[in-house]
Amino acid sequence: MTRPYERMGRYIIKRLLTAVALLLVMSFVTFMLMRLTPGNYLDTLRLDPQISKDTLAYYEKLYQLDKPAWQQYLFWLAGLVRGEFGYSFYYNVPVAKIIGSRLGNTFILSFAAFLLTWMLAIPLGIWAALNRGRWGDRVAQFISYIVLSLPGFFVAMVLLFWASTTGWLPLGGMESPGAEDLSLWARSWDMFRHLIIPATALSLGSIAALQKIMRGNMLDVLGRQYILAARARGLPEHRVIYVHALRNAINPMITLLGYEFSALLSGAALMEIITSWPGLGSLMLTAVRSKDIYLVMASMMMGGVLFVIGNLLADIALAKADPRIQIK
């Protein structure tokens, strides 16, 4: 008989193999879209009279830019297998060095928004379900509808305008000037203050949507026969709600966990640009505008890898939380 951890191991390997195929397709489509647009980064260099034609020809040969698109893609793919992401023409450094410095910043923003979303959405959904039809529930649902109708970038701009008028929070960026000279605690507090606006704007829509889903799940579970039977046996109300009802109501939310984290990652790109947060979003914009193709490819691959990991972790967490789900 196959042991549970063996089934889990096979499942993870199968998912990873599928993920590799998806990432290859995504990278190929991204590469071809970049190639279909006219010109490349060397066209910008050709406008500089100080750069000789021999230098441009050297770069074209070095990075296979004089070859057909499919050969360039294979050249990039071969470098990726060796752990090389290519060279950034715009920043004049290896792509891996730039990605390494920006990936952590994007993860900090996305993870902060993720924690804020789930720490507020789940309790609000439970509270709204337990107070169904009362004024508090109606106010919460009304506010959720308003928040869902507001684009995240608009919320960010409103918060930035509010910060500019009050001076209570920084207007953008990740750190204040001279933050590197501060103590660890002071620097962490400074980063936290810079994080408030982008994390709040990024998470508000998700909070509104997830609390409505959690409310509906709780209302559905609270009407089940086994909940009525638990109350009939005289079990304490808090045990009925937070042990029996909550465990079944939260299972569908675990399925959304990976997708929600991936959505926050993709949404962080626009939020980073608006709030000047130095992450992958602003880096991707610079790379696309400058036709820095290898930097674009590496940024897309990092986003795809995080998306795959998020969904895989969500599936594993769901299998652990619900014994009825069998991993094959």
Image (tube, grey):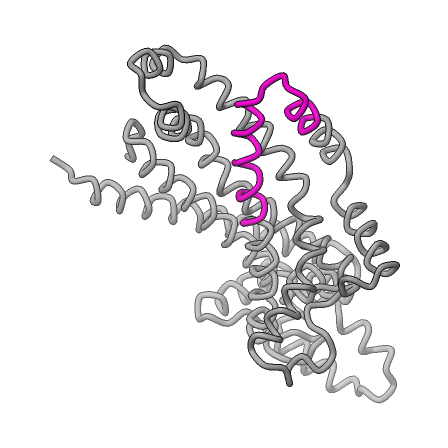
Q: Residue at x 79, y 59 (%)?
A: 38
* Residue toward you, 3 or 238: 238
Q: Residue at x 35, y 23 (%)?
A: 236
* Residue toward you, 46 or 309: 309
* Residue toward you, 264 or 56: 264
Q: Position of residue 43 (x, y in %)?
A: 80, 71
Residue 125 forms part of the magenta stretch: yes
- Compared to 114, does 89 lie above or below? below
Q: Residue at x 44, y 31 (%)?
A: 250
Residue 314 forms part of the magenta stretch: no
Chief secondary structure of the magenta portion: helix
Q: Residue at x 55, y 29 (%)?
A: 127
User: Which region is colored magenta?
Assistant: 115-141
The quarter of the displayed image where residue 326 is located: top left
Quarter of the rendering occupied by the C terminus:
top left
* Residue toward you, 168 or 233: 233
Q: Position of residue 188 (x, y in %)?
A: 59, 71
Q: Position of residue 227 (x, y in %)?
A: 37, 16
Q: Residue extending furthest left?
A: 1
Direction from residue 54 to residue 32 in the image, left or right: left
- Compared to 319, does 13 lie above or below? below
